[in-house]
Each structure stands twice: as C-alpha cells, then as structure tokens.
Amino acid sequence: MSTDIHLAFAHPEERAEATASADPRDRISLRDYLVEAEIGAFQLERGHRQRLMFNVVVEVRPQSGPIDDDVDRIMSYDTITEAIADELSAGRLNLLETLAEHIAERILSHPRAMRAFVRIEKLDRGPFKLGVEIVRTAAAMPVTAQSDDLVALHPLVVYLDNRLIGAADLPERIDALGLDGVPVILCVGLPDKDVPQVGVTAVQRRIDLLAIEQNAWVLAGRDRRWLVTESRTEIDWAIRQGSTIVWAPSKLVLDTPDAPIQHAANGPALALWLAEQLAARALMVPVGVSVSAGSRVPVETIPA
C-alpha cells in the first residue's frame, strides 16, 4: 500500500486507484452512508446510539460478457448496504475495527468481489471524526460456514391458484403464513381467461410466461404491500427487507440455462423450481394441486 501522506485521509476510492494492480478491475462505491447504532468500548457509549459514517469501495472482476443492462450480471450496491445492516443487527460491538472486518468479510464472499476498502467514522464523540479504515482482499479472507442469520432467510414459496387469488380473506391468510418472520414468495399460474395460442413452441412459451406475469400483477393488486419481482437480485433484496414477494417468472426462467422452460404454462412446476433455486424451507400449494415427486424442498398444503 502506498505511504503517501495525502492518501492517509483520501477517500477510499482514491486509495483504491492509487494502489491498483496491473490487472484491470472495476469499482463500485458507497459514499457518506450514515447510520445510527450503539457501538463502543467506553462506558459513556453504552446505552446510547451514535452516528456512524461509512465509505466503502469494492474492486470487482470485470464483466466477461455483455451486461445487457441486466442487474443480475453485476454486483449490486445492495451487497454493501446489506453487509453493513447485517453486521449492525448481529449484536453490539465494542470496536470499529471488528465491525469493519466483518463487513469486509461479507462483501468479499460475493464471487465478483476482489478487494474491499472499508472506512467507518464516529461523528458524535466530539468536534471531530474518529475512524478506522481497512483494506482486505478476497484471497486473504477465511472460508466460513453459512451463519444462522442467513439460514433464517430461506423463504416460504406459496403457489396460489385462481380461486385463492380472488379469495376475500387472501391478505389475512398470507399474513398468517409469515407470522414467524419467514419471507413469503407468492407464485401464480395461468389466468382463467383464454391465452392466445400459436403454432411455434418457443413463441407459445413466451406468451404463457407473459400471461402468468399478468396474473401476478393482478395478485399484487390485492395488497399494496406485496412487491412484484423479476430478477434474482430483486428477489434476494426483497427477502432481506422482509417483503412479501409476487414472482413474475419470465426474466429468471428465460435467463437461467437449466430452467424448466418446457413447463412455461405450468405454474406449480415453475413455483417448485423457484423454491429449489432459493433453497426454500417449503413450497405450499392449495388442496388438489400436485407437483412432481422427489423435490429437495418439502411440499405442504396451504391451511384452509
């Protein structure tokens, strides 16, 4: 690392550029991210929240192919903000150094992250800023097992037929499924109305997926809290926010090589595939709806 004195207080982005290796890397950054939290080793800091300022720069592997304006092909900025939120919610810490280490470790667990600069500053200890900055590389980070808090985010996938989509008490029933804090993802099939039919299989599959998406938007209209998602990045973000999700399947099914595109008109089959992709704790289906046997995900019946 460069020892030039002007870099000691420069923004992490400037330090990243000054210490870059010869191989090309892209960078994403989070500037002046303000959060309140309780942290500190001194007694006067206990029981009091104080402002923390985060500045983070992450060097990422350059994209090998076209991005195509697709959020699933990049490292999302949410990776940084979620790393901060997860570590602050994990429990009280005494040291900024510990917090910075944990945040860097989470960020560098992303497959595209190569090097992370993490600066954290306390703003309320006096008429100045107290802070720490660390630099960590992916190669130097220890391999750790998945923690319990990530396991707890495994969602419940629920397939709704058209009878349930129209049920008067549907919002209350969905709320009851998520009472223990488990994220809920709602999936649907084809609507009751006739879907246009064509003679080209590839075209018909896209029409069927679009018809399912129309039905998903109809479902989302039942409750303003329900968030329609299309990409894997959106789904992961919504799960972490605790949102109830309505899945619009076209993008993920068409973008994933091993997706069951041959079942584009089969809502339960698509829901089962999504549940397996997300390592869901269960797939719930209405009485009378069946899915293929042998799934890695338990299949349960929606309570009456």
Image: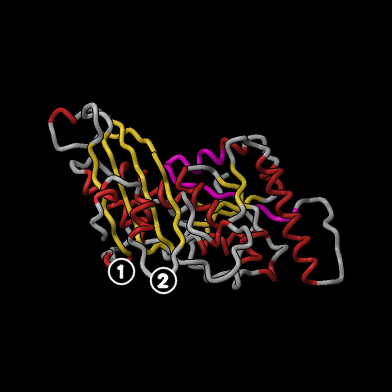
Q: Nearer the viewer, residue 34 or 298?
A: 34
Amino acid at circle 1 = Ala
Q: Residue at x 66, y 65 (%)?
A: 254
* Residue 103: mark: none
Residue range (magenta): 173-190
- Classify 10 Å Cα crowding around label 2: few (below 14), some (14-19), many (20 and above): few
Q: Is residue 65 above or below residue 190?
A: below
* Residue 139: mark: 1
Q: Residue at x 57, y 56 (%)?
A: 71
Residue at mark 2 to residue at mark 1: CA–CA distance: 15 Å
Q: Is residue 200 found left or right of 290 in the rendered image?
A: right
Q: Residue furthest left?
A: 43
Q: Nearer the viewer, residue 39 or 221?
A: 39
Residue that badge 2 annotates: 23
- Classify 10 Å Cα crowding around label 1: few (below 14), some (14-19), many (20 and above): few
Residue 185 on the magenta span: yes
Amino acid at circle 2 = Asp
Q: Nearer the viewer, residue 109 or 132?
A: 132
Number of numbered discs: 2
Give the percent coordinates (x, y) of residue 45. Answer: 18, 30
Mark 1 secondary-structure assignment: helix
Residue 217 on the magenta span: no
Give the percent coordinates (x, y) of residue 24. Answer: 44, 68
Q: Nearer the viewer, residue 181 or 104?
A: 104
